[in-house]
């Protein structure tokens, strides 16, 4: 710890922002936690000063207004994703699963009941050190009880689940989506695949797998779902986050709503 220098921290910050350009909030949080931890070491006298000083990292990222993607754009991306990763893409873009949750779905978590398919979310895959200087994917339980949930697959996408189980069968206790060598898929690898598909689809907007949560929350709200009901499907306990952060308004909706207003007494 006493060998840590501001220059080393600066290099770490540059590498972090280069590796994860789409997660400025997470990058900022990582920097803040690092500075806090080293600050405790200073407080207890282990080191004399805190070398975690990066001016750019200390600034809170500005909130960018997310434009809700069109269904056609999401379907275009899905069409260009390799077959092995279509199920994960369907779960993220159209069913609101986080990337780690979608990658953690096991074959036994997928239930077919007649013409309906249900996916049980019971955990998330996250990157952790493998003890040999590299990283590995590790299964973690949901952070809150709301994370444990069963998500009904939209009728339009039932075929994707059935096709995936047929083409890429694994044991019930194994992950439904694995690499060609049978290993867990890294979230970074999937994101690279996703963004290649987005470019191939000709979608210029900055759309990430996480946009699926905004998309589904907004569509569910338009269908009349309450924030509590939406939270049940999305695994989101805090309804204020659903309303204030995720829920968007499609551009044409204000006009539609105003045309439906009845002023008769």
Image (cartoon, grey):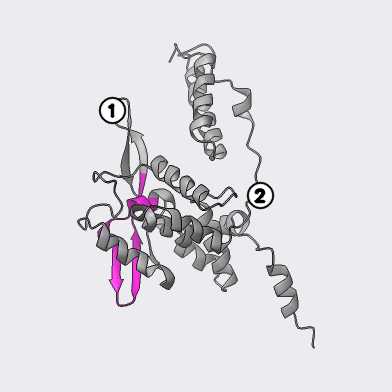
Task: Please identify the residue farthest to the bottom as the structure is shown.
Answer: 265
Q: Which mark is residue 131?
A: 1
Magenta stretch: includes residue 231: no
Residue 97 appears anywhere in the view: no
Q: Quadrant of the N terminus?
A: top left
Q: Quadrant of the C terminus?
A: bottom right
Residue 246 visible to an observer of this rendering: yes
In the image, residue 76 lies at what x, y percent? 50, 58
Q: Residue at x 26, y 43 (%)?
A: 183
Q: Callout 2: few (<14), some (14-19), or many (20+) C-alpha neighbours within 10 Å?
A: few
- Where is residue 10? Give x, y as percent: 54, 20
Q: Is residue 156 left or right of residue 204?
A: left
Residue 115 colored magenta?
A: yes
Mark 2 secondary-structure assignment: loop
Closest to the observer, 58 or 182: 182
Kindly indicate whether the residue at mark 1 contacts the one at mark 2 (C-beta within 8 angstroms): no
Instruction: Name the mark on residue 65.
Output: 2
Q: Residue 201 location in percent, x, y?
A: 51, 53
How many marks the image carries: the answer is 2
Disc ID at residue 27: none
Badge 2 or badge 1: first in the primary sequence? 2
| Left or right: residue 159 compared with residue 203 | left
Quote the CA–CA distance across marks 2 and 1. Answer: 39 Å
Q: Is residue 228 above or below residue 65?
A: below
Please tell me whether residue 25 is drawn above or below residue 84 in the rendered image: above
Provide the residue span drawn in magenta.
101-125
């Amino acid at each position: 710890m006493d060998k840590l220098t501001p220059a080393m921290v600066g290099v770490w910050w540059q590498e972090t922002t280069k590796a994860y350009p789409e997660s400025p909030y997470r990058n900022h949080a990582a920097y803040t936690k690092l500075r806090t931890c080293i600050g405790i070491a200073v407080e207890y006298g282990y080191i004399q000063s805190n070398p975690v000083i990066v001016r750019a990292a200390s600034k809170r990222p500005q909130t960018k207004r997310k434009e809700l993607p069109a269904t056609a754009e999401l379907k275009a991306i899905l069409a260009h994703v390799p077959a092995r990763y279509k199920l994960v893409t369907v779960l993220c873009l159209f069913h609101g699963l986080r990337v780690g949750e979608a990658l953690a779905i096991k074959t036994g978590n997928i239930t077919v009941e007649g013409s309906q398919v249900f996916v049980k979310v019971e955990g998330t895959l996250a990157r952790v050190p493998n003890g040999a200087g590299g990283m590995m994917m590790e299964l973690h339980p949901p952070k809150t009880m709301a994370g444990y949930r069963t998500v009904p697959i939209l009728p339009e996408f039932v075929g994707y689940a059935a096709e995936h189980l047929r083409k890429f069968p694994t044991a019930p206790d194994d992950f439904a989506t694995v690499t060609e060598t049978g290993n867990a898929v890294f979230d970074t690898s999937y994101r690279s695949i996703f963004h290649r598909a987005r470019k191939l689809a000709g979608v210029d907007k900055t759309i990430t797998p996480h946009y699926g949560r905004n998309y589904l929350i907004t569509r569910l709200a338009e269908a009349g779902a309450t924030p509590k009901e939406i939270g049940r499907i999305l695994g989101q306990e805090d309804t204020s986050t659903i309303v204030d952060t995720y829920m968007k308004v499609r551009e044409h909706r204000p006009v539609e709503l105003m045309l439906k207003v009845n002023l008769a007494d």
